[in-house]
Image (tube, rainbow, N blue to C red):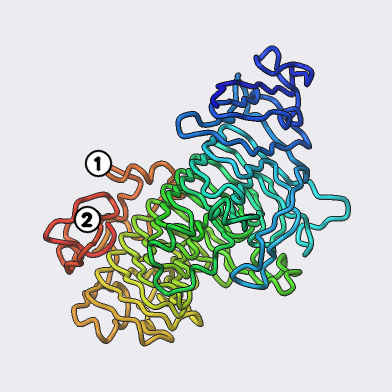
Amino acid sequence: MTTNRTFYVSSQNGNDTNPGDAPDRAFRSLARVRDINFQPGDRLLLERGSVFQGEFLHLTARGTAEAPILVDAYGEGPLPAIHAAGSGLWYQNYGGHLDNVVHTWKGYVSSAVLLYDAEYITLRNLEITNHPQLPGERYNQGDRMNRTGVSVIAKDCGTLHQIELDHLYIHHVEGNVYDKHLNNGGIYMSVSRPQDEEKTGIARYDGVHIHHCRVEDCRRWGMAVGYTYQHDKFTTLELPDEVVEKYGSTNVLIEHNSLKNIGGDGITPMYCFRPLVQYNVSENIALDMNSEVYTEAGERQGMTAAAMWPWKCKTAIFQFNEAYSTFFNQDGEAWDADSGDGTIYQYNYSHDNAGGCIMFCEGESVNNIFRYNLSVNDGTGTITPVRNVDAHIYNNTFYIPEGVPFIRPGMSEGGILVENNIFLYAGREPKREEWHHQTEKAVYRNNLYCNYQNVPREDDQAIIVDSASEVIVKPGSGPVRAGEETNSREEKTTVFDGCRLCKDSPARGRGKTIENNGGKDFFGNLLGEKKDLGAC
């Protein structure tokens, strides 16, 4: 049944005795909304300027493809604000231990917004917080309350379709920094074991779109999508398409979001089939991953975080993203191809990340591709190949700060094929590099090396250059928080022009042909027969 009703809520001018069917007859509280049995086509509108202090919005509404449900703002002024302040408690239960048995799998969670078995629904134009501490509660205590800005749960309705989060401003959500997979942080979408799976079907998502959201000052996660009770179906090295499509989430798109000051990880799709993560910007990720804050984990471990990465996904694509100022920890990189099959990072820009540019993590990380990316001043070690099966690293430009090795010390042993790249070392003196640090599985071919004393022994086509100014227009340049400007690389002039090759650069026309190379470079230029080295 489609009703196409519109309900209005105003903390300023409403009254809960009103019918809520017009702006001048609006409800006053979100508690009144819980009395509504939403039908396909219904709209719930919150008045701009309204502040719902100590309130929460929990919905089980289910629209249809033809008649989705909309939660949005109306009127003029600032976004309507939901300040949960630890309210909105519900009990999360995955139905069994997680893929790492030390991780917490059940417990109470406070969520400002909860979409529980909801589908064909859009949440738009809201400000959301959830942060005041309870009496006697410390920020980093081990049993701190789990908190979320927006929680989404799939459980007893099989596949949930078309969940859209659009233009949300989520900030100051201070959850439990140790409970990685309870719904802690800005946005967290997870999947719990159904009460009767044979009756309702496998719980999962098909169609998630998170875009134009701003997430700031949140712990633990910025955005996480897809953690599932079906994790035991994802144990093979190469993940069959049919398995991931059946048990994981599909049609997941995360784009045009901004994240800043996140205690743990930034953006992570989990157990997804071909998720696309693009045009996002992260700053100051992994704030709490240090021994001063992370003191009461107990057996939960988990003092690691990176900016944007997939977990157990098939053919995840990360492109046109910017990650910078990720804090140092065991990870601390901009990017991390973690325990998945076929992860592709392309056309991304990382800079000033304390843990490096990218990690290829553990023995279940396979068929990885890293191409046409720009890394500027990423620290500790540019590449971290941790026992991964393989990674094809080609046509990237690495501007490496003084004293930083290409392979991160103490975290290697993985396989990497490195070709068509530009290495620009920014030290005052040429560096003697350990190109095979703790791994004999590293192979280098046809790269350009600037300001190095030595090159890899097997790179018999190495191009050796003394000065970076011979190679690119303005070595070490690059914008900070380029944001939407990163989307305009195909314009005649861009904020990345200092990273372009010089007119007579020795990198021009020296690239070897690589099959299935994506067809375009960092700037969107079509790759012709005569290929260049580097990303740009």
> From the viewer's perspective, is residue 315 above or below residue 25?
below
Task: Point out residue 194 in the picture as x, y percentages from the top left corner.
Answer: 62, 55
Amino acid type assigned to the residue bearing label 2 in the image: Gly
Is the N terminus in the top left, top right, bottom left or bottom right quadrant?
Answer: top right
Q: Are discs 2 and 1 less than 8 Å apart at CB?
A: no
The crowding category of the residue bearing disc 2, from other C-alpha atoms within 10 Å (few below 14, some 14 to 19, many at least 20), is few
Q: Residue furthest right?
A: 136
> From the viewer's perspective, is residue 504 above or below residue 88?
below
Mark in the foreground, 2 or 1: 2
Q: In this view, does 441 lie to the left or right of 140?
A: left
| Residue drawn at (29%, 83%) of the image | 456
Task: Point out residue 104 in the picture as x, y percentages from the top left corner.
Answer: 69, 65
Residue 463 in sight in this render: yes
| Residue drawn at (17%, 69%) of the image | 512
What's the CA distance linking mark 2 and mark 1? 19 Å
| Residue drawn at (45%, 78%) of the image | 363
Q: Which residue lies furthest to the left in this view?
A: 529
State the residue position of label 1: 492
Task: Point out residue 189 in the picture as x, y percentages from the top left corner.
Answer: 58, 51
Q: Is residue 114 left or right of residue 283?
A: right
Q: Which residue lies furthest to the top in this view?
A: 24
State the residue position of label 2: 519
Q: In this view, does 343 lie to the left or right of 419?
A: right
| Residue drawn at (64%, 62%) of the image | 180
Q: What element carries label 2?
A: loop
Sequence-first disc among 2 and 1: 1
Displayed quadrant of residue 229: bottom right
